[in-house]
Image (cartoon, grey):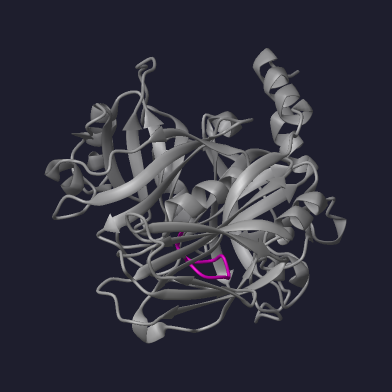
Amino acid sequence: MLSLRRWILLTALVCSPVAAKEIDFTRYLGDHSFKESNIETSFIGTVGEGRLIISALPNTNITISVNGKTIAITDKLVDGHAEFSVDLLENNTISVDLTSPPPTATNIRVKQRANIELNVLARVHFNTNVSNFVEAREFYGKLGFETVSGFPDTNTQAMAHAIGVETPTDYDGSKGEHAGGYLLHGELIGAGGFWGGVIDLIEFTIPRNVEAPYAQLNHLGMARAAMHTTNITADYQYMKSLGVEFLSAPTQRTDGTLFAIFKDLDGTFYELLEVDGEDIETDTTHITSLGHVNINVSDLERSNAWYQMFGYEVTETLPSTEPAEVAKAMGFEQPFTIKGNRVTHDVDGSVLELVQWLAPFDPERAYPAPVNHLGIHRTAYSTTDIEGDVAALKAQGVEFLSPITPCCSGDDSSSSIVAFYDPDGTVIELVEQPYVLHLLFK
């Protein structure tokens, strides 16, 4: 039978009303210099009013054309900023002409408010790819992670295509399912089972990718995920005895939290984060649950609005910098500068940490498709209406890896998935499947 807690959560997830939200999207964003002037660029919008927002040095001479309508800006910048109303279409063009070379780039942003209604209920898991599943499973097991569920090692070519795999592959079909698809092995694992959060732990054999995960915590994409512990000192000592690589001993941030960054066997970053809770005796760690997933972005304003579509609202602003000892504990020789915040899902309470690194900044995009790169490559969310959500996302210009695809048991599949990119190339996945309810009832 279900416990009271599970009934409450199940009822909240399935019965929560979905309401349309007005979101202030960034439709276009560009830094323009004199030598790159007057190049026409296209962008997606919806039919209606938008706002053209310019940030430049005073007395910068700029001519901007949006959908063939020209706006000349000479003395209209007030304190380096100006805003104009523009008419947008579904498909738009913009060109920027700088008639004299300003000493710094001119920032042009087009924003537009739109109502959007998605049916996203909860984060199902985030995916960590590993080079050796057996060794990785033993590693995570020593941290206290249990098997929540398994899944097929092979699947259809359509399913392979859904995660960005070019088909047909070299897979010959000898392990089951259809030739030409992928071959992998994995499990869903969790600290405290499903209820503490789930990692989709996978080793890909076909196609194989052994490139190392992100080398630094400021790389665009999902650079790390947090694990909550009730005794970080004990866990640090225990994990060090196992040979786990840490960037530093537990360190205190300016908000008083204790943290320590460590790597799994392939170099994927995780953050131990101490939280309040009962300090019980254990043979492994005091890790009780997974915490926030960090997603580094190139523009915080744009990404805050983008993730708001999925039910995330800003709940905490991060300090713009930290002392040198905190920077060192995160792998940096000098203090860093960021713009960042934590956003919390309005149904399941899951948290993302969205961070725009100002210094040091790494402009390289997140891991490309297919989603087999070592490290944290994608995050999956459950929805009650995948077709409706895909239509709504496409209307907002979201780029998809493939159409909606039956998942995850070959021809017998009763579920569906679809994967797509956030503005910086981070892969997000929607899942509509009874399998999630199976986990709830398990």
The reply to whether residue 257 is visible in this rendering is yes
Confirm whether the magenta stretch covers residue 275.
Answer: no
Q: Does residue 239 lie above or below 78 as drawn? A: above
Q: Quadrant of the C terminus?
A: top right
200 on left or right of 99: right
For the image, the number of numbered tags is: 0
Q: Which residue does the image show at 70% across and 73% down from the upper left?
A: 181
Residue 66, percent across and down? Answer: 59, 72
Residue 321: x %, y % from top left: 23, 44
Front residue (pair 271, 26): 26
Q: Position of residue 215 (x, y in %)?
A: 31, 62
Q: Is residue 207 visible?
A: no
Q: Foreground: 346 or 248?
A: 346
Give the extent of the magenta segment.
367-376
Q: In the image shown, does 88 or 403 lie closer to the viewer?
A: 88
- Foreground residue among 44 and 161: 44
Q: What residue appears at the point 38 percent right and 82 percent down from the top-left corner?
A: 99
- Classify 2 as above or below 129: above
Q: Residue at x 73, y 55 (%)?
A: 417
Quadrant hosting residue 311: top right
Q: Is residue 253 left or right of residue 315?
A: left
Percent from the top left, x then y, of residue 108? 45, 65
What secondary structure prevails in the magenta region?
A: loop
- The quarter of the rendered structure image containing the N terminus is top right
Query: Which residue lies at the image location 38% right of the left edge and 60% below the top edge?
Result: 77
